[in-house]
Image (cartoon, coloured by chain):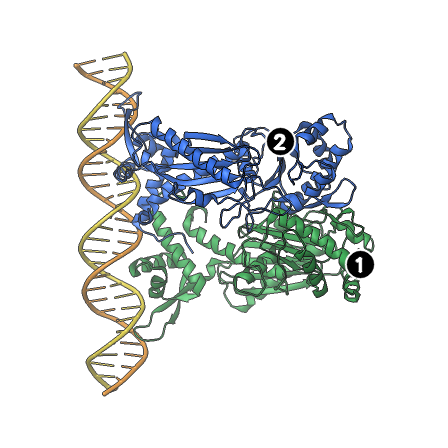
Chain colours: A green, B blue, C orange, D yellow
DNA sequence: CACCTTAGTTAGGAGCCTTGCCGAAACCGA
DNA sequence: TCGGTTTCGGCAAGGCTCCTAACTAAGGTG
């Protein structure tokens, strides 16, 4: 079935969308510039802008363009377009950002967490971070009229149920930040939808964006796999340009994948670390410090290093077989370790279907970068959507 | 960036698309019926139909509706809308179908192949099948004016390179139909694009369609995995409602996946069959007959049966970890074997993240069913596209 | 044969986009 | 300081699409 009914209203909405998207990409433009950019005639753009101004979505900034000829008056998105909330929950801290449709971070805050803090402590930290962001947002520029948080995007360092957005505890896997329901926690702060996903998936998105921007060795491809090796083991599968989450959102939870153990036997990935004595005391989480020390001391061909490479290369083989990535990006604290990446590359070259292995390029808070990018995209869609169907605004 | 520039031409194209889609779904309709179906006013529909008749895409069939009130004149898609070609290449036969936008099979043919026929024999069989279809098509109804084959969809029983459409021979995997280039072979028969993919992916699509239609136990879900166990080992991954092919089209080629071997050691899937003595003489293909005999004779707990179930359950685990399917559908000659499915279900229930295992419901030529469905969808899009951008027609 | 019902056409109106033209306003060089 | 040039934004006319409402045409029904 076709997209929409043919009506003049549809045309109007379409020009308005063009205007909004142009302003999102260029911050401020004169009507003549918008016309030039979109290829739509000047009178039509003028009408569209007027309508958007009446709606309150666009404002005349008062500034004037300079250059030859008459100066045009700049227009820009108004505050009423609202903002998006970006939240990152890791075992170390809750980070919170408020971004607008341009991608500017309007306000941000971070509340550190003690190791092993329970779900209650985490949710309290989240409330604190939200309050800080709210305060920062209100003081930075005076009136803040109509500032509404339209959507939220949450990154959590645990598996996320796709349908409910709740964090889930998988058997024999570490549960780092605990039993949280971000949708419920943010319900009174955010008007619109709250999108929750795990940090690895967001980090993959950041990696993808970096690749498209031309970063060396990054995943510019529409099909790649991001392997995240840290305290927990994660993986993101990007197919046809999108992170694929699977039925319940647990795609990429590779802890129980069958691979080659240190003794050559078929072993679940998480068990490999138990056998190598690399688990943290009384936990299923990986003791990253101990692992790195052991890898750092290891000469090439060291059994621990080779056992790790063999186990991860089994994961590689599975990813290649099922997802056929153009490249595999490895991230996470020990995943990016040079010696480990080198060992993995050696293994990978020997596979039946070798695949390039690249270290992640987004080092600092990749999950936040990815979540932020998603938040901006979604916010923009919501703003445009308000024009397309004013009834549900 | 928004879809298209707002223009009156766009509106016109949109009504025409509505008319065409309505006629595709209902074969023949009066203008009043189209108006009722689409919610567009009668005069507008009349204009749209007139334009389409002028273009030659729609014809007045001469029939008249009966019932109370004035009889309306039926309209339908014209022959000029063209047809799509559906080709299935298996080691046993080349099958060829010509379908129209309604999904009717206008003509079909099948040319059997001898076992082990090379690529040359296969391409000769394809030419023969094409000629038969052409002949059948011309005789069945007299004039056939303007019948053009607008697109083709090809299913091949070997891995397909996504970019080129060529069949590829993976190491240590059977190469059943040989080194073919279907796009080249069909180049002079088909005007438009030729879509080539392997049979398992098409079969998965058929399974999906059956599930949406409400077949019991079938994959109506948007996220499932189709495991095809026959001479060759294949797998299709459906994520977010689409078959995902991966970067080079080799997603789902699971032969080299690391799993549990009969001796408990980490073993590549294809090796398991070598170790169990279930490969065909001098080939990497599986000896299905011998396998079935052994499974049929096996009591519950038989080592061969259990070894097979263990190996396949490793694949299951990998698929669950990476793709998170709502259900795993098993197809293929021995994949659907009752005893085997039962053994696999027992294993699956014991997994950390169990997943329902269902036997495939589309038994007869599933790859043809799936390819046909894709061909119809594509053909419809091409017909509509001709209206949307008449310049590139 | 009158009446009812439904199909399709005609007429009028509203809205949107475009081209072409105009005045307004800024910069530039003399 | 003051025309000339250049560009911005507005206005008007024209063309097109869709819609509603009314009308004619053509079937069946009693």
Residue at image position (53%, 50%) is A240
Residue at image position (71%, 36%) is B348
Q: In this view, does A101 lie to the left or right of A162?
A: left
Q: Which chain carries label 1?
A: A
Q: Position of residue B30 (x, y in %)?
A: 31, 29
Badge 2 marks a residue whose secondary structure is loop
> Crowding near pointer 2: few (<14 within 10 Å), some, many (20+)?
some
Reply above or below: A148 against B262: below
Residue A105: in sight, yes or no? Answer: yes
Q: Is residue B32 left or right of residue A170?
A: left
Q: Where is residue A138 in the image (x, y as percent from the top left)?
A: 55, 65
Q: Where is residue A261 in the image (x, y as percent from the top left)?
A: 77, 50
Quadrant position of residue B234: top right
Residue B115 or A145: which is nearer the viewer?
B115
Q: Name the residue under label 1.
A: A303
Residue A308 or B348: which is nearer the viewer?
A308
Reply above or below: B246 against A217: above
Mark drawn on residue B296: none
Residue A300 or A165: which is nearer the viewer?
A300
> Crowding near pointer 1: few (<14 within 10 Å), some, many (20+)?
some
Reply above or below: A366 against B247: below
Residue B238 or A179: which is nearer the viewer?
B238
Q: Is residue A298 left or right of residue A58?
A: right
Mark drawn on residue B333: 2
Of the 4 image quadrants, the one containing the N terminus of chain B is: bottom left
Residue at image position (35%, 38%) is B148
Q: Position of residue B36 (x, y in %)?
A: 35, 32
Q: Mark 2 lies on which chain?
A: B
Instruction: Report, in whole angstroms, how far the alpha carbon at label 2 lies from the one at label 1.
Output: 42 Å
Q: In this view, does B251 lie to the left or right of A294?
A: left
Quadrant position of residue A36: bottom left
Q: Is the residue at mark 2 from the same chain as the one at mark 1?
A: no
């Amino acid at each position: 079935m076709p997209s929409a009914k043919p009506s003049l209203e549809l045309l109007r909405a379409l020009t308005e969308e063009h205007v909004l998207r142009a302003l999102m990409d260029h911050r401020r433009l004169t009507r003549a510039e918008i016309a030039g950019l979109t290829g739509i005639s000047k009178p039509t753009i003028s009408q569209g802008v007027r309508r958007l101004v009446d709606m309150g979505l666009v404002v005349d900034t008062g500034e004037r363009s300079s250059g030859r000829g008459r100066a045009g008056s700049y227009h820009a998105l108004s505050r009423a377009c609202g903002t998006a909330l970006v939240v990152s929950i890791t075992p170390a801290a809750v980070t919170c950002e408020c971004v607008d449709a341009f991608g500017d971070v309007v306000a941000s805050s971070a509340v550190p967490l003690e190791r092993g803090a329970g779900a209650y402590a985490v949710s309290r930290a989240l409330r604190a971070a939200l309050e800080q962001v709210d305060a920062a947002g209100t003081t930075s520029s005076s009136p803040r009229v109509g500032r509404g948080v339209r959507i939220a995007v949450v990154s959590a360092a645990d598996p996320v149920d796709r349908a409910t957005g709740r964090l889930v505890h998988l058997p024999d896997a570490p549960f780092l930040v605990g039993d949280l329901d971000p949708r419920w926690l943010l319900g009174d702060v955010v008007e619109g939808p709250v999108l929750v996903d795990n940090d690895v998936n967001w980090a993959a998105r950041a990696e993808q964006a970096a690749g498209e921007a031309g970063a060396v060795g990054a995943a510019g491809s529409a099909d790649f796999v991001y392997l995240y090796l840290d305290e927990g083991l994660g993986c993101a599968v990007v197919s046809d340009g999108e992170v694929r989450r699977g039925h319940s959102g647990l795609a990429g939870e590779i802890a129980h994948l069958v691979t080659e153990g240190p003794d050559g036997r078929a072993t679940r990935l998480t068990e490999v670390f138990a056998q190598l004595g690399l688990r943290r005391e009384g936990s299923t989480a990986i003791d990253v410090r101990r692992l790195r020390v052991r890898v750092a001391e290891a000469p090439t061909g060291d059994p621990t290093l080779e056992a790790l490479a063999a186990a991860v290369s089994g994961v590689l083989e599975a990813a290649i077989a099922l997802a056929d990535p153009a490249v595999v990006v490895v991230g996470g604290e020990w995943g990016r370790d040079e010696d480990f990446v080198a060992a993995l590359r050696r293994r990978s070259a020997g596979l039946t279907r070798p695949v390039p292995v690249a270290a992640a390029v987004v080092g600092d808070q990749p999950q936040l970068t990815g979540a932020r990018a998603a938040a901006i995209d979604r916010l923009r869609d919501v703003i445009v959507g308000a024009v397309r169907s004013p009834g549900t605004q």
